[in-house]
Image: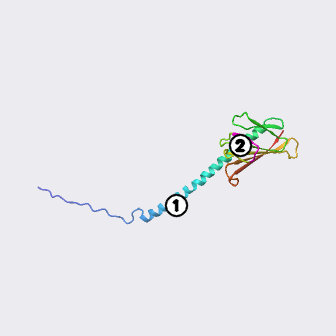
Amino acid sequence: MTQAKSHFRPAPPQIQKDSPAFSLVEVVIALGIISFAVIAIVGMLPVALKSSQDSMRETDATLIAQRIFSELKTGSSGNRSVTTAPDGISTHNINLAANSTNYLAFTQDGTVQAHTNSANPTPSYDFYAQISISTNTGLTNLSRVQIDITHPPSAPPTARATNSFVTLLGF
């Protein structure tokens, strides 16, 4: 007995009309929306970087002012000393009993570099501190101390940022 071989061919797969695929138009629109969003995010990076740098400079200015205030608070007489050089030994006396203006220059890390008698900032410094003493407070033995931190001093005057800090100190 011989068996007959059957030649069975499977039916070709049928394409369903309701298949869950994306059309080319939908893919192109989705890519366009994603690329628009990515370009907008990349465009914001320089703004975020500048904001971060400004924030760091303001923090450094605050730390410099706190350091100057803490040096001026130590002592009991009208003459107080502030450090004027990186060695920590060189100092300059500031008289809290008389109206005066003093200038200190600082590097980016907050290290004091020099004491000057001029309001003209030197471009080699990152921060410039103007310390103004005013005895016109209405009370004896009390002075108003204002510290204006300018940065960067090498920039034109219109492009410089200035942070002001004020306190009252007794002597």
Region of the chain picked out in magenta, as a range: 112-119
Residue furthest to the top: 89
* 78 on left or right of 43: right
Q: Nearer the viewer, mark 1 or mark 2?
A: 2
Q: Which of the pair 45/2 is nearer the observer?
A: 45
Q: Which of the pair 119/26 is nearer the observer?
A: 119
> Disc 1 to disc 2, how far (Cα)?
46 Å
Q: Residue 105, which numbered label?
A: 2
Q: Which residue occupies 28% across, 62% down? A: 12
- The location of residue 67, given as percent across then percent down, is 73, 40
Q: Which of the pair 48/7 is nearer the observer?
A: 48
Picture quarter with the C terminus: top right
Count of all numbered marks drawn on residues in the image:
2
* 62 on left or right of 8: right
Q: Is residue 96 above or below residue 11?
A: above
Q: Is residue 129 magenta?
A: no
Q: Are discs 1 and 2 less than 8 Å apart at CB?
A: no
Q: Which residue occupies 39% across, 63% down? A: 19
> What amino acid is labelled 1 in the image?
Phe
Q: Label 1 belongs to which residue?
A: 36
* 33 on left or right of 148: left
* 4 on left or right of 139: left
Q: Secondary structure at mark 1?
A: helix
Q: Secondary structure at mark 2?
A: strand
For marks 1 and 2, the one nearer the N-term is 1
* Colour scheme of the rendered structure: rainbow
The secondary structure that dominates the magenta segment is strand
> What amino acid is labelled 2 in the image?
Ala
Q: Residues within 10 Å of mark 1 (few under 14, many from 20)?
A: few
- The location of residue 52, given as percent across then percent down, is 62, 49
